[in-house]
Amino acid sequence: MGLIFFGTPEFAVPSLNALIEAGEEVSLVVTQSEKFRRDKTPIPIPVKELAQKYNIPVLQPERIREPEFIERLKEIRPEFIIVVAYGKILPPEILRIPGRYCINVHASLLPKYRGAAPIQWAIINGERITGVTTIVMDEGLDTGDILLKKEIEIKEDDDAISLSKKLSEAGSRLLLETLSGIRNSTIRPVKQEGKPSYAPPLKKEDGLINWHKTAVEIRNLIRGTIPWPCAYTLLNGKRLIITKASVVEGSGEPGIIVETEKKFIVGTGKDLLEILEVKPEGKRAMDAPSFLRGRRLKKGDRLGK
């Protein structure tokens, strides 16, 4: 009995790689179809590339409820189905296929942050601790019984990219521990306890900065929305993405620029925000001094609507 692995983005790669290096028999990898750039060239799928490197068969079904696809999974008679950031909800017909369990590696300490964007919302909400959880999948949204958890600290300099990498590596190790524990009967599923919270997919408008929030909250938004949708404000009617910032003690009217000489500092609902790096609409990212040299901004100008 082998394994079937469902996964798509870079976050899933360490888990698949860990299974391969541990000598697990990965019989099939299922991933989503390629998306295309503006020039119509396909965007590579990290999980697919790794599977092809090891000559593991790959399927990319448009509809995972198709009888032919489900029959193909049944033919493998897998011990486990492993799901890591696949991007689609598995129907009951698939959940019932493995000899043991469908196991999901989720990037939060469930039941907190169920949903598609747990890493981003944990940072946006100012959490200091997050983690990864392995669960037995059921028909709900990340509601299955818990197998193992691992806590990870969110550091001050973490953003969604760096934290995702930490959690993906931790998740790969937790997955191997989980499989071993199930096989030797040292791990048993337990019900989720505590009040659940949710992490819905980010929308473009979630990146809009509300300057009446505190400087800490705005900085958390900047960190949590990298690389998409990114935190942004309006300057003279055009979008200005802010990619790096720091909190400075002091006070100023929300959205009003208080310094443009050597530093780019803006008032918020509490304290000040020093903008360190920006990406103007249609241009490359640049540090704040470079941006200020090309603008006639002055103290008292307003950011936002």
Image: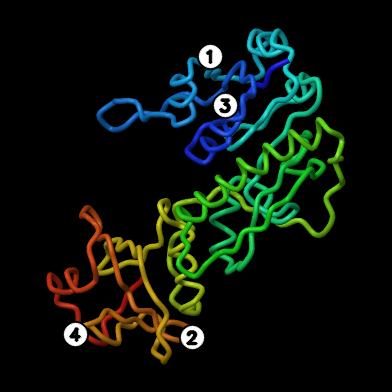
The Cα–Cα distance between marks 4 and 3, rounded to whole angstroms, is: 55 Å
Type of amino acid under label 4: Glu
Say whether marks 4 and 2 touch (CB < 8 Å).
Answer: no
The one nearer the camera, 297 or 176, is 176
First reached walking from the N terminus: tag 2 or tag 1: 1
Residue 237 location (% of width, % of height): 27, 65
In the picture, the disc for residue 270 is 2
In the picture, the disc for residue 261 is 4
Say whether marks 4 and 1 touch (CB < 8 Å).
Answer: no
Give the SS element for disc 3.
helix
- Residue in view at x 79 percent, y 41 percent: 144
The Cα–Cα distance between marks 4 and 2, rounded to whole angstroms, is: 22 Å
- Residue in view at x 32 percent, y 74 percent: 275
Give the SS element for disc 1.
loop
Type of amino acid under label 2: Lys
- On the rendered structure, is 73 left or right of 167? right
Type of amino acid under label 1: Pro
Say whether marks 3 and 1 touch (CB < 8 Å).
Answer: no
**Front: mark 2 or 1:** 1
In the picture, the disc for residue 57 is 1
How packed mark 2 is, by other alpha carbons closer than 10 Å (few <14, some 14-19, many 20 or more), is: many
Image quadrant in which you'd find residue 151:
bottom right
Give the SS element for disc 2.
loop
First reached walking from the N terminus: tag 4 or tag 2: 4
